[in-house]
Image (cartoon, coloured by chain):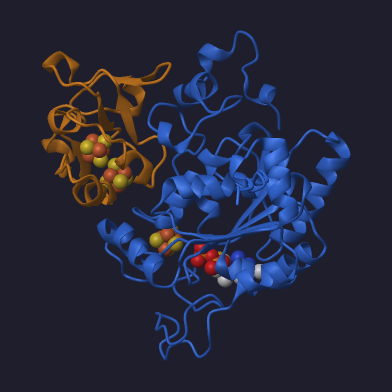
Amino acid sequence: MYLVANIDVNICAATSCKLCTQYCPEANTILYDEEAGKEKGLKYGAAYVAVDRCKGCAQCVWVCDNMAKHHAIKMEMIDQIEQAALTENIQYKEKTTKAQLTKPVPA
Amino acid sequence: MSLDYMKFTPGFGKFMPKEYRDLVEHGPFGRKVSVSQVGTFKEILEEHPMCAGCAMTLFIRLAMISFPNPEDTITVGTAGCGRLAISQAAIPFVYGNYGDQNGVASGLSRGLRLRFGDRPKDVVVMAGDGGTADIGFAQTLHSWFRKEKFTTIMLDNEVYGNTGGQESGMTNKNQVLKMAPLGKKFEKMDMVGMAKVAGCAYVATVVPNNPRRVESVIKKAVLIAREIGPTYIQAYTSCNIEYAIPTDKVMEDAKNVENDRYRFSEYITDEAKQYLAEVYGYKEYLPKPAQALTKS
Ligand SMILES: Cc1ncc(C[n+]2csc(CCOP(=O)(O)OP(=O)(O)O)c2C)c(N)n1
Ligand code: SF4
Ligand code: SF4
Ligand code: SF4
């Protein structure tokens, strides 16, 4: 198994500073869902990771911890993550994206 | 090389892979996108085999987002790590043999001007420090002296990354590398100084830990090269493998190196300033209003 980045929507959607996306070396990997967390009353939408594209470098963790100071991203074993986004389940929209979350690897 | 080449032949759209459909429907072609909007549109760069956490990868990604007209852009590269990613983008890529990239780009940019006249077609070279300053040195300098109108970007990881750690002209003095075990014997080459002497209209040094600044210098360099003259960007893009930088410390390293010896610098000729102001509305380069006369 291997590590990928996982973003805590509860922390991210409280501010959604949009920093980690600009620093992930991989394209199309950290995306935004402007609606994420709104059902819980959180205002800003949140970033999420297309785990099939993530190379596990943890640069986003450094950025969220040290630049944004939000501590919303953790590296986790891919089979330990309950719900994650895969590229094939991501829909691009006008100014946002929406992912249908699934268990990333077969149980 | 135009907006149309991206589109599907009518009726074929539904058979195309999802990544391709996303690109046509939600990519950056034919509209303005910026680094601050990443994560909400489909980027032209696809998956590639460059190492995890490589700063060069991040720089290439940011460059691709920053091209003013991706649908009218051709990239030129050569042997070295960068081409592994640059070639995996939805814009045409020309591979010059190692060191030939600025010669190839000279011919390409002249040909495009003959073929398309006034319609801007942007040629952007992205090559490693070895490709640009060592084996490609003569062609790089000649393209500048000859005032060839295209952008040269050096992906300066201060080593031959792709071949396992030999020193390049851009490696710092005394640096020990896997294949330079006694340390480098002479100074890092001053390619920025040479770019100015050779007549580049715009020269900048940049580090990818400031994505919006990368965006700004790439846009200016590409626009100025359309009509004014050659432009050169030298980007510090560390090799975390050869310099043993843990991947989660790559941005910390970039910040430290920027503060220490790779400060942001920008040189722009008056002609280029005037061009950006008049043609592309750059307010920072508009002539300053004459000082109001103060009553004595
Ligand atoms: C004519 C020729 N000589 C040598 C090589 C082998 N070669 C491939 S990449 C490379 C070094 C690349 O170093 P650099 O240009 O600094 O790019 P980096 O890989 O560090 O990004 C060399 C020597 C080659 N491909 N072609
Ligand atoms: S840096 Fe952290 S808080 Fe900011 S968008 Fe990314 S995950 Fe959310
Ligand atoms: S771990 Fe690296 S590749 Fe994965 S999302 Fe974070 S920055 Fe991107
Ligand atoms: S060898 Fe170095 S420069 Fe090349 S992809 Fe790996 S980290 Fe990047």
Residue B196, by quadrant, is: bottom right
Give x and y (percent) for residue B17: 48, 23
As displayed, is residue B67 above or below residue B144? above
Asked if residue B235 lies left or right of residue B149, the reply is: left
- How far across and down, in percent of the image, does residue B168 sit? 54, 76
- Toward the viewer: B115 or B209? B209
Q: Report the number of discs.
A: 0
Please give left or right for residue B209 compared with residue B161 in the image.
left
Residue B151 vs residue B229, the one in the foreground: B229
Palette colour of chain A: orange
Toward the viewer: B266 or B233? B266
Q: Residue at x 67, y 39 (%)?
A: B73
Spot occupied by residue B46 in the image (x, y as percentages of width and height): 47, 38
Relative to A1, residue A87 above or below: above
Residue B119 lies, in percent from the top left, at 79, 33
User: Most extreme residue toward the front, as rendered?
Assistant: B296
Q: Colour of chain B?
A: blue
Residue that appears at 35% across and 24% down: A88
Return the residue found at the far right: B114
Determine if residue B75 is in view: no
**In what quadrant of the picture does the N terminus of chain B appear?**
top right
Asked whether, in this view, residue A80 is left or right of residue B101, the answer is left
Choose top left, top right, bottom left or bottom right for residue A4.
Answer: top left
Of residues B247 and A42, which is closer to you in this image?
A: A42
Tell me, yes or no, if residue B273 can be seen here. Answer: yes
Quadrant holding ligand 4? bottom left
Residue depicted at 83% across the width and 48% down the height: B110
Please, is residue B133 above or below residue A17 in the view?
below
